Amino acid sequence: HHRYMFHEKQEKQVVRDGKDKKPKIEKKSVMRARLQELGPRFTLRLQSLQKGTFDSKHGEYEWVHKTDMDTSRR
């Protein structure tokens, strides 16, 4: 999951006018948004695929995870 984080930031901008030699500094208030990740990262792995409606005792399985299919993540 992610959430939006909003921050108000003061930005300075140098404005040069052709008439004056001295530059003017303008301050603007700018709202910034970013995403922050919540919680740990994890990967879901499919354990089984069942035909029809869910029935754990008498259901017919199309595919079941076998431990020999596991590989190292390194």
Image (spheres, grey):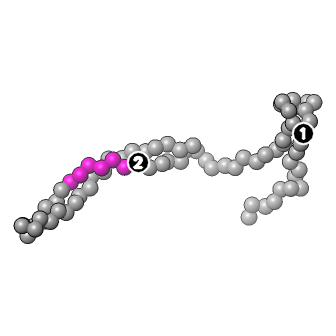
Q: Position of residue 5 (x, y in %)?
A: 43, 45
**Up/down of 43 relative to 24, above or below:** above
Decide: few, some or many residues near mark 2? Use Cα within 10 Å; few <14, some 14-19, many ≥20. few
Viewer-proximal residue among 73 and 26:
26
| Relative image position of residue 23 (x, y in whole percent) | 13, 65
Q: Which residues are magenta?
A: 27-33
- Residue type at mark 1 is Tyr
Q: Is residue 13 left or right of residue 18?
A: right
Residue 33: mark: 2
Q: Residue furthest left?
A: 19
Say which mark, if any, is on residue 15. none
Whether 27 is drawn above or below 20: the answer is above
- Residue 52 vs residue 42: left or right? right
Callout 2 amino acid: Ala
Q: Which mark is residue 61?
A: 1
Q: On the picture, is 27 further left or further right than 72?
A: left
Which quarter shows the C terminus?
bottom right
Query: At 33% from the left edge and 47% from the top edge, which residue is drawn?
Result: 31
- Image location (x, y in percent) of residue 30: 30, 50
Which residue is more in the foreground, 3 or 54?
Answer: 54
- Let me know if residue 6 is in the magenta part: no
Tell me the quadrant of the picture where the N terminus can be found.
top right
How far, Cα to Cα, is label 2 from label 1? 46 Å
- Residue 62 visible in the current orientation: yes
